[in-house]
Amino acid sequence: MSEFRQNPITKNWVLIAPARNKRPDQYKTYSVMHGVPEVDSACVFCPGSESKNVEVCRIGADALRSAQNNPGQPLEKTRSDDWELRIIPNKFAALEQTAAYRRKDFYVSHSGDGDHEVIITRKHNEPVALQSITTVELTLRTFIDRINILSKNPALAYVQIFHNHGRDAGASIIHPHYQLLATPIVPPHIHDEILGCYHYYQNNHSCIYCDIIKEEKSVKKRVVHESDHFIVISAYASRSPFETWVLPKKHGARFEEMSEEEIKHLSFVLKVTLGQLYTKLSDPPLNFYIHNMPIRQSRQHAAHEEKAFHWHLTIFPRITIWAGFEYATGIPVNPIPPEVSAEFLRGEE
């Protein structure tokens, strides 16, 4: 039976319209990494091609041990060819360091000043789902390091980190990598989420994400995985099949302020969750991204908003496409109820 569901934070609607003749495993598309070699000499991100890119820095495996022994300190950089992660400016940057301006006549515009970086992991054919937990942890710590560094720039308002896996998810290069865009404005989706969270907090004196966690733990039908510090759920108003939320159990507005134990747990939880999707859907194209609070100095009343907002990570498999109804109404149609998605990912379907 079809059902309209509303996202409790943004108040946007989705239409859950089950396709009765299709099982969850029939939504497999193609394996992104099938037949891809460990090293590709033509790939500009592979070891041996370092000279093809301008480089921000390299990070070696030793940086993880150093970070664990010196929490809160910047990651150690290396010049070694035996790197684990490299950070480079995006060659085709959507943003660039340029003279800032803002115009408001009839139309409003702002210069596209900011930063656009690429964070590259070493192995050409190793998606995040197959990477070691130590590599995933080092990557998360690199995200934190870059957020802290870029947040010192008073011209920037927000740092967005995301991952594209597969051509249908927007990846122009198959080699596993992440992108970081630091923008001079707060993106509309982030603004809407913060506003929705704050309105809920004013009316209920609690964080809506904390209350979502309580509800999902009570209902249990949409819980995919749970650890001491994180819960993974199929979102109640999922915009597409297998849209998955990773939520910290402890309230926190800022990804970069995770505890040492939370970083370790998130490394495991992220690998397990992506591994479930990799196995159950045969390595589908997907995006994942972190929604975080804006940079502190860029907004007023952040202290009030931080009580209401709860950082989170969203995983979004790209196995359906928008058509006329979705573009005309802005209402996504999801053919698999999230309860079915969660059951399937848990291995109970």
Image (cartoon, grey):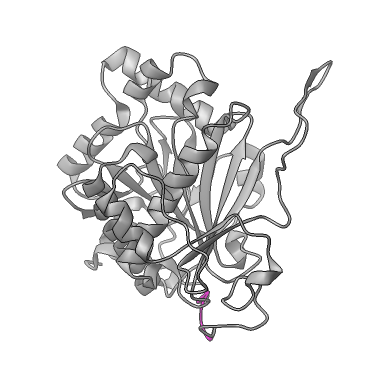
Q: Nearer the viewer, residue 335 or 238?
A: 238
Q: Residue at 64% across / 30% down in the picture?
A: 184
Q: Write down the quadrant of residue 106 in the picture.
A: top right
Q: Position of residue 9 (x, y in %)?
A: 41, 29
Q: Residue at 42% across / 48% down in the picture?
A: 314
Magenta stretch holds residue 321: no
Compared with residue 105, is residue 2 higher up or lower down, i.e. above or below?
A: below
Q: Going by the image, does 112 lie left or right of 190?
A: right
Compared with residue 2, is residue 211 higher up or lower down, i.e. above or below?
A: above
Q: Nearer the viewer, residue 305 or 51?
A: 51
Q: Write down the quadrant of residue 88 in the picture.
A: bottom right
Q: Nearer the viewer, residue 23 or 147?
A: 147
Q: Position of residue 82 (x, y in %)?
A: 47, 74
- The image quadrant where one finds the C terminus is bottom left
Q: Going by the image, does 195 lie left or right of 236?
A: right
Q: Does the image show residue 268?
A: yes
Find the magenta span and give its range.
31-35
Q: Does the image show residue 16?
A: no
| Majority secondary structure in the magenta region | loop
Magenta stretch holds residue 34: yes
Q: Going by the image, does 179 lie left or right of 279?
A: right
Q: Residue at 33% across / 37% down in the picture?
A: 257
Q: Write down the quadrant of residue 330 in the picture.
A: top right
